[in-house]
Amino acid sequence: MHWLIAYDISANRRRTKVAKRLERAGLRVQKSVFVAELSRADVDGLMQELADLIDVRTDTVGAWALPQAWQTAHVAAGAPGQPVFETSVIW
């Protein structure tokens, strides 16, 4: 399943840690937005890891499941290009 994961983190150090972890899980499509192909169990584990990295009083991280049709139904303009998945993006 594809997931859209986004964050809003106020402190540079925490933001960097979260971004580095998300770069290992998926593809960055904006500065604070990632798309990843993960199972529900994997995204639950990832969100727990991220919760341990943030300050829950000031920061937020969210993950939203994308519908299957998203792979062929999305449109975009501008650079960089939007991801098109043919295989998993977990690395």
Image: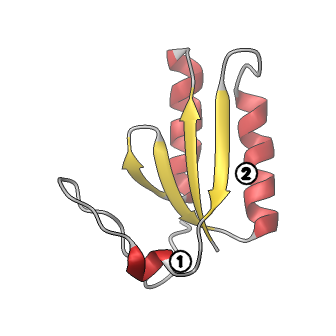
What residue sits 66% from the left and 23% below the top? 59
Q: Is residue 74 left or right of residue 77?
A: right
Vertical comparison of 27 with 66: above or below:
above
What residue sits 57% from the left and 80% below the top? 68
Q: Which mark is residue 58?
A: none
Q: Which mark is residue 46?
A: 2
Dot 1: few (<14), some (14–19), or many (≥20) neighbours within 10 Å?
few
**Where residue 53 sits in the image (x, y, percent)?**
71, 29
**Amino acid type of the residue tagged 2 in the rendering:** Leu
**Where residue 66 sits in the image (x, y, percent)?**
59, 67
What residue sits 57% from the left and 23% below the top? 9
The Cα–Cα distance between marks 2 and 1, rounded to whole angstroms, is 16 Å
Residue beneath disc 1:
88
Q: Is residue 51 left or right of residue 66?
A: right
**Where residue 17 sits in the image (x, y, percent)?**
57, 31
**Amino acid type of the residue tagged 1 in the rendering:** Ser
Vertical comparison of 82 with 39: above or below:
above
Q: How many marks?
A: 2
Give SS at disc 2.
Answer: helix
